[in-house]
Image (tube, rainbow, N blue to C red):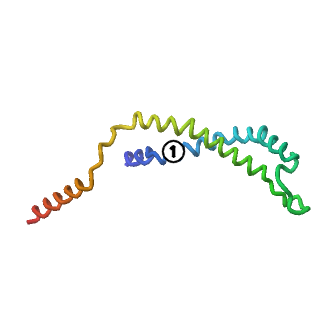
């Protein structure tokens, strides 16, 4: 029972997903601070105002402001987090998996070899039933 659980946890996709979630959560504070203190002022400088952000207002109501700067900042945050996850965790993990992953698979059988094997198995099965 525990072996099956261990096999499930050690599958590549589960580990990749877990790493991405943990690291993404851990770097959120760092990236948020970076974007709030560096990226947002730069975007606001390009837009001309820090009060409303970089965007446009549809009507006189301030709640109709379309904040394009927030979308740009979110995109920059995503790229930063994705780069950190990839270069700090995924690349070393893949390298370690290749290095210590176990025996390499041999060459795959051709279609003819597989059909011959199926033929032989069927012949053995029919011979044992007679």
Name the quadrant containing residue 6. top left
Q: Residue 118 appears at what percent x and percent y?
A: 21, 59
Residue on which disc 1 sits: 16
Q: How many marks?
A: 1
- Residue at point 51%, 35% (across, down): 92
Q: Residues within 10 Å of mark 1 (few under 14, many from 20)?
A: some
Q: Residue 66 appears at what percent x and percent y?
A: 81, 57
Name the quadrant containing residue 27. top right
In this view, the residue farthest toward the right is: 60
Which quarter of the image is occupied by the C terminus?
Answer: bottom left
Q: Residue 88 appears at what percent x and percent y?
A: 57, 35
Secondary structure of the residue carrying tag 1 is helix
- Residue at point 30%, 48% (across, down): 108
From the viewer's perspective, is residue 17 above or below residue 121? above
In this view, the residue farthest toward the left is: 130
Q: Residue 128 appears at what percent x and percent y?
A: 10, 61
Q: Nearer the viewer, residue 130 or 64?
A: 64
In this view, the residue farthest toward the bottom is: 130
Name the quadrant containing residue 10. top left
From the viewer's perspective, is residue 70 above or below residue 86? below
Left or right for 40, reference 112 = right
- Residue at point 32%, 42% (across, down): 105
Left or right for 4, reference 120 = right
Q: Nearer the viewer, residue 37 or 23?
A: 37
- Residue at point 74%, 48% (across, down): 72
């Amino acid at each position: 029972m525990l072996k099956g659980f261990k096999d499930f946890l050690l599958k590549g996709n589960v580990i990749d997903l877990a790493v991405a979630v943990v690291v993404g959560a851990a770097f959120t504070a760092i990236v948020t601070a970076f974007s709030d203190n560096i990226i947002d002022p730069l975007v606001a400088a390009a837009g001309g105002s820090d009060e409303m952000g970089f965007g446009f207002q549809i009507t006189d109501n301030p709640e109709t402001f379309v904040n394009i700067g927030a979308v740009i900042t979110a995109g920059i945050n995503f790229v930063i987090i994705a780069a950190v996850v990839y270069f700090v965790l995924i690349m070393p993990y893949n390298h370690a998996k290749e290095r210590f992953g176990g025996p390499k698979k041999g060459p795959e059988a051709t279609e003819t070899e597989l059909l011959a094997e199926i033929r032989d198995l069927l012949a053995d099965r029919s011979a044992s039933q007679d």
